[in-house]
Image (spheres, rainbow, N blue to C red):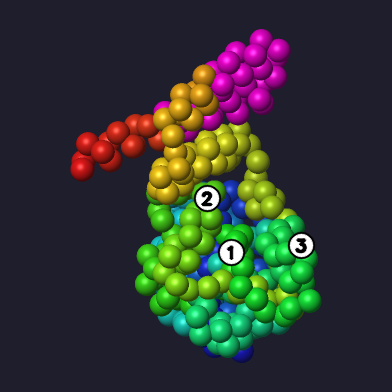
Amino acid sequence: MKSSNISVVILFYRTPEKVITKLNNYKDFDLYILDQSNDLELKEKVKKIFPKINYYGVSSENKGFAKGINFLVKKVKTKYFLCTQPDTYISKKSILRLKKTLEIKKDSIISVPRIKQFKNFENSQKNKKIFPVNKILGAIFLAEKNKFKKIGMFDERFFFYWEDVDLCRTIKKNNFKIYLNMSAYANHVGESSVKENLKSFIIRKVYFKYGELIFQSKYKKLKKIKIIRESIKFSLLTIFFGLTLQFKKTLEMLCFIYAIIKFLLIFKKANKNH
């Protein structure tokens, strides 16, 4: 039996086959999936487990987390949607508790479970059942769709990383609240949702730094001196790690330098258009 009024939206990108077993938790919900690594083989395996998936898109272009989730949310027909990742486990009971939170708290837009790997509350609050928080983990949250769309959803300038931090700012600006339900639990393994290779390593490093610069620029916190200081620092560290044969650290520094260049080029283009 389908659980009314809740859909589950999930992004795949080079997702290991072993993690799809966690999707069994969502068999009673409308399911919307977008694979941005063009894995047709995985699609066939998932559809055998869930023959009634509402939407399963496959794309050869990785448009990032923010744009991918926004794309799926626009397709959702239910009042609520659970945004989650393949490496995150949450029970049906916890999902329904999150829904109950949104129904009780009329000023809410998002409800989140307690996550073992992510603490977003003070110790003094742990004896409360439901209370507002300022931070979420983009890997798992339940949202009221129309309110989420009303505030503009995720800012698609973020590829992944920082989009959840930015969303929390947007929610506060629009006078909505995020509630943590301590009786709802989730387990976020992290990183295991992607097969690690050179390409995924580069993407993660580039877009973490790039997202940081976008975020700071958006909220007028980015100073020119930081760009200059970090450009010099990462260049010197690239030389040092290269000379000491630390390949991974050398590549990481090059990723940060590329992120700065990418940001400056886009920033320059945006200013030119205005």
Secondary-structure class at tag 3: loop
Q: CA distance from mark 1 to mark 2?
A: 14 Å
Residue type marked 3: Lys
Q: Which residue is mark 2?
A: 162
The answer to which of marks 3 and 1 sits earlier in the sequence is 3
Residue drawn at 47 percent across, 67 percent down: 171
The residues bearing labels 2 and 3 have C-alpha atoms spaced at a distance of: 20 Å
Residue under pointer 1? 134
What's drawn in magenta, residue-wise? 233-261
256 within the magenta span: yes
Magenta residue check for 238:
yes
Q: Position of residue 174 (x, y in %)?
A: 41, 69
Camera-side residue of 81 and 174: 174
Above or below: residue 243 compared with residue 9: above
Q: Main secondary structure of the magenta part?
A: helix
Residue in the image at 51% along x and 62% along y: 168
Specify which label sits upstream in the sequence, 1 or 2.
Answer: 1
Spatial separation of the CA atoms under disc 3 and disc 1: 17 Å
Tell me: residue 149, above or below residue 4: above
The type of residue carrying mark 2 is Trp
